[in-house]
Image (cartoon, grey):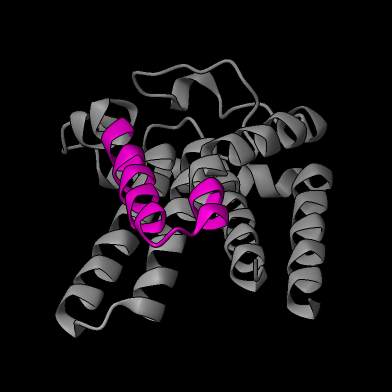
Amino acid sequence: MKKIKFLIIAFALYTIIIMACPDVTAWDKSLIIALQTKLKNLPLFIPLLPDCKLYTLMIAIPLIGGSVYFLKKKEWFKTLFICSIPLITFLLNCIIKPYVHRTRPPYELQQVIHPHSFSYVSSHSLVTFTLYGLIIYYCCKYCPNKYVKYSVITLSCIWILFVGLSRIWLGVHYPTDVFGAYILGFILCTIYSKIRI
């Protein structure tokens, strides 16, 4: 429980710094500009992948796969928890975003999509980190085949990082929004790993 308390305090302090320090937003903007400049020759369909059917599929796969796996083992709580992750992350976003009240990056930095909701934390990054963080946790704990284990862990890490990068690349989130989502996702995964029902 000490680890979870420490993580929650760290997330709260991180959020306060973002709210209170305008220099963070200025630094964020410079990072978005630098990233967009580096990647300007790449087609924009690449960062748009997490905004299309692929993203829905990448959420559905662990939800369905995890549910089937746990239902076969008659582990009802784990089935319920896996299925509730999109709802839990959505509710957290509904609480955090209006409270922090951080506006999106400037319109001129946004490419293709122009969302109107608040920016902190990135909901795409949060749900992705939480779902795929649990996949990594289960692979480490239960997968006996080393090749399968390392392949799944590697692909999960790549997808987590790609979704976060795509949010910054498109200019719809600041880097600190994505990192905040990763911290919160890690907290959710840690809480889940400590629950024994």
- Residue 181 falls within the magenta-colored stretch: no
Q: Is the magenta stretch mostly helix, strand or loop?
A: helix
The percent position of residue 185, horizontal first and vertical second, equals 57, 55
58 left or right of 7 in image = left
The percent position of residue 43, horizontal first and vertical second, equals 16, 32
125 left or right of 113 in image = right
Quarter placement of the C terminus: bottom right
Quarter placement of the N terminus: bottom right
Depicted 154 relative to depicted 122: above or below: below
The percent position of residue 162, horizontal first and vertical second, equals 32, 50
Q: In which quarter of the image is residue 120?
A: top right
The percent position of residue 39, horizontal first and vertical second, equals 25, 43
Residue 114 or 56: which is nearer the viewer? 56
- Residue 59 falls within the magenta-colored stretch: yes
Q: Can residue 192 be seen in this view?
A: yes
Q: Which residue is drawn at 46% across and 21% down?
A: 108
Depicted 46 relative to depicted 145: above or below: above
Q: Residue at x 60, y 40 (%)?
A: 89
Depicted 35 relative to depicted 184: above or below: above
Q: Residue at x 84, y 46 (%)?
A: 20
Q: Residue at x 47, y 38 (%)?
A: 124
Q: Which residues are the magenta region?
A: 56-81
